[in-house]
Image (cartoon, rainbow, N blue to C red):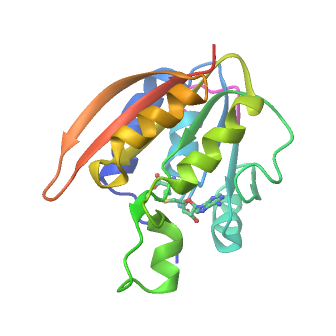
Amino acid sequence: MIYEPDEDSFLLVKHIKRLAKNKRVLDMGTGFGILAETAIRSGAVDVLAVDINEEVIDYVKSKGIKAKVSDLFSNVNEKFDLIVFNPPYLPEDEMEDEETRRITTGGKRGYELLGKFLASAKSYLNKKGQILTVFSSLTHKDKIDKMLKEGGYKFDCLEKKKLFFEELYVYLIFKD
Ligand SMILES: C[S@@+](CC[C@H](N)C(=O)[O-])C[C@H]1O[C@@H](n2cnc3c(N)ncnc32)[C@H](O)[C@@H]1O
């Protein structure tokens, strides 16, 4: 199963259009590749797409995007100017089947995968590198702000969007 681009994907697309020009970009958890494609079209000098799901990687490679299977950074060996990540960020829901859970659930509370990503991401950013990400009010915004501060990151909330039962937050995160 591959994640169908949704509100969260489209929010990131909007910001990638102005942020990706002349940058080396990593699309973490690429899904259908919408964020990688946007970066390519917006003038990024190099784009790598990674995902934990092999089906995803076969698909995006067939579209001509440079891509490889990786569990977060496990198979990433370069540094980037911009890392974009629309992570699975929802809290665990026992009713959800295993396949859906893998693309939408960030852990028991929702923020665990994003936390794991942030713990390593700094080492994969060039000087002045940035991270563009999105998460939901269901992900516990306070916890994410705390993780960012403790990790030594600076960040701006670029946009908030109210949906039916949640609010989405788009964050631009700075290493330096
Ligand atoms: C919410 S979808 C986003 C897909 C796409 N980037 C978009 O914006 O439409 C999350 C993606 O992260 C991938 N993913 C989940 N856990 C991962 C991990 N540990 N490492 C890399 N990718 C992961 C999923 O397979 C899925 O494709």
Q: In the displayed structure, would residue 28 be above or below residue 58?
A: above
Which residues, given as a range, are shown in magenta? 40-47
Is residue 140 in view?
Answer: yes
Looking at the image, which residue sits at the far right? 77
Q: Is residue 137 left or right of residue 100?
A: left
Residue plotted at (53% across, 55% down): 112
| Rendered-image quadrant of the C terminus | top right
Q: Where residue 91 sits: x, y (%)?
A: 39, 65
- Inspect the magenta stretch and tell me whether residue 61 lies in it: no
Q: Where residue 28 sits: x, y (%)?
A: 62, 48
Looking at the image, which residue sits at the far left? 164
Q: Where residue 110 sits: x, y (%)?
A: 43, 59
Residue plotted at (41% across, 31% down): 171
Q: Where residue 132 sits: x, y (%)?
A: 50, 33
Residue plotted at (70% across, 53% down): 72
Circle count: 0
